[in-house]
């Protein structure tokens, strides 16, 4: 499972010219799921996201998590995080999980974040979305769940 995380001043998702979700300061999480991912991967990544210290403390150091200042989280499914362009120029998506498995684990990830006390908004799984964001920093990180043992 992969999560591309951006610290944002604000972000929103539009579907068919309607705003589906909007957040203020917090984290925008693009989430990709691969074949071998499990609920344990979703729980692991949700825990990492909730504890990720990318917000400044009173000394200007990145030492606070999104929960430390009551920030919001916007989670958007993005199978293209598993796009492969090592051969040719057209991405292949063989590593992306099938939609049913991906949606189940996407929802599990969102549930885990909420269980950890974070205010979470979402895009719509498998919809064509327009995502707008104001990256703060910029701060962008890629997290991955540990490989299967």
Image (cartoon, rainbow, N blue to C red):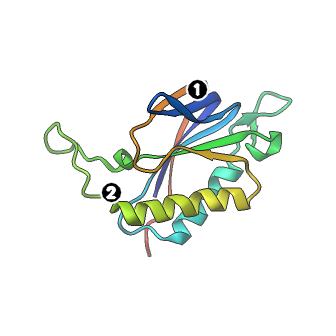
Residue 142 location in percent, x, y?
Answer: 50, 45
Q: Which mark is residue 96?
A: 2
Q: Is residue 36 above or below residue 16?
A: below
Q: CA distance from mark 2 to mark 1?
A: 26 Å
Q: Is residue 115 visible?
A: yes
Q: Residue at x 84, y 29 (%)?
A: 59
Relative vertical location of residue 64 with respect to residue 93 in this rendering, above or below = above
Q: Residues within 10 Å of mark 1 (few under 14, many from 20)?
A: some
Secondary structure under tag 1 reads strand
The N terminus lies in quadrant? bottom left
Q: Residue at x 42, y 58 (%)?
A: 33
Q: Residues within 10 Å of mark 2 (few under 14, many from 20)?
A: many
Q: Is residue 133 left or right of residue 34?
A: right
Q: Which residue is mark 1?
A: 135
At a point 33% along the width and 57% down the height, the residue shown is 96
Q: Position of residue 61 (x, y in %)?
A: 76, 32
Task: Name the N-terminal-most of marks 2 and 1.
Answer: 2
Q: Quadrant of the C terminus?
A: bottom left
Q: Secondary structure at mark 2?
A: loop
Residue 145 seen in this snapshot: no
Residue 129 in the image: state x and y as whole percent: 43, 36
């Amino acid at each position: 499972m992969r999560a591309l995380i951006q610290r944002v001043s604000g972000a929103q998702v539009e579907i068919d010219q309607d705003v589906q979700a909007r957040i203020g300061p917090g984290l925008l999480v693009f989430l990709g799921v691969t074949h071998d991912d499990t609920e344990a991967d979703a729980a692991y990544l949700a825990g990492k996201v909730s504890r990720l210290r990318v917000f400044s403390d009173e000394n200007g150091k990145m030492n606070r998590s999104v929960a430390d200042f009551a920030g919001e989280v916007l989670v958007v499914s993005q199978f293209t995080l598993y796009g492969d362009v090592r051969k040719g120029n057209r991405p292949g998506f063989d590593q992306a999980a099938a939609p049913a498995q991906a949606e189940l684990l996407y929802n599990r990830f969102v549930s885990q974040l909420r269980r950890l006390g974070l205010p979470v908004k979402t895009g719509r799984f498998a919809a064509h979305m327009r995502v707008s964001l104001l990256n703060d920093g910029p701060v962008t990180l890629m997290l991955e769940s540990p490989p299967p043992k």
